[in-house]
Image (cartoon, rainbow, N blue to C red):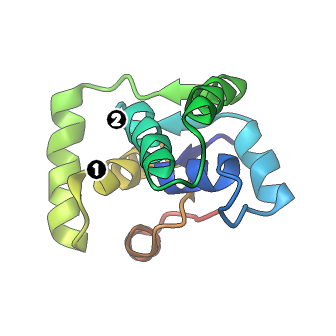
């Protein structure tokens, strides 16, 4: 079953100085991932921030963005207004940002496991009954 993957998990896979997920989890994610629409921008922003902080070179930003093409990514095609409304409700309920709540909303709606290293998002997912990778 495909999973929902957030930016924190994606950055951990690809940034060289991050603690990488275990091989079994990466294999599970490689089968295909669902992401909210803002995922691409959030991951790109993470790479740019890593470059600005001297963690990676500027040329590596483009290389890492290219590496994302190796993932089987399924962007969410649901009605954006409905998904955003539900994300806002979840954000208020669990004390998340709307950006993070969008991952939870997608995992709940699609009934898929969630891959994240975000502590608050993990806690919210468990409270909502979402399986974590």
Say if mark 2 contacts mark 1, CB within 8 Å.
Answer: yes
- The location of residue 33, given as percent across then percent down, is 60, 37
Residue 103, placed above or below residue 58: below
Residue 113 visible in the displayed image: no
Q: Split into 4 quadrants, where in the image is the N terminus?
A: top right
* Residue in the picture at 50% in, 45% down: 51
Q: Secondary structure at mark 2?
A: loop
- The location of residue 60, given as percent across then percent down, is 63, 34
- The location of residue 43, given as percent across then percent down, is 47, 41
Quarter of the image where one finds residue 3 = top right
Asked if residue 42 lies left or right of residue 35, the reply is left
Label 1 crowd (10 A; few <14 / some 14-19 / many >=20): some
Residue 64, placed above or below residue 56: above
Q: Which mark is residue 99?
A: 1
Q: Split into 4 quadrants, where in the image is the C terminus?
A: bottom right
Residue in front for this viewpoint, 61 or 108 = 61
* Residue in the picture at 67% in, 46% down: 14
- The location of residue 29, given as percent across then percent down, is 70, 45
Q: CA distance from mark 2 to mark 1?
A: 8 Å
Circle 2 residue: 38
Q: Which mark is residue 4?
A: none
């Amino acid at each position: 079953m495909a999973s929902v993957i957030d930016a924190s998990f994606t950055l951990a896979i690809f940034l060289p100085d991050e603690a990488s997920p275990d091989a079994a989890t990466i294999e599970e994610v490689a089968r295909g991932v669902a992401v909210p629409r803002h995922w691409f921008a959030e991951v790109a922003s993470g790479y740019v921030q890593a470059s600005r902080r001297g963690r990676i070179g500027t040329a590596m930003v483009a290389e890492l963005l290219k590496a994302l093409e190796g993932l089987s990514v399924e962007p969410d095609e649901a009605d954006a207004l409905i998904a955003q409304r539900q994300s806002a409700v979840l954000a208020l309920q669990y004390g998340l940002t709307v950006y993070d709540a969008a991952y939870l909303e997608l995992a709940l709606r699609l009934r898929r496991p969630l891959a994240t290293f975000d502590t608050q998002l993990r806690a919210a997912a468990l409270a909502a009954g979402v399986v974590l990778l």
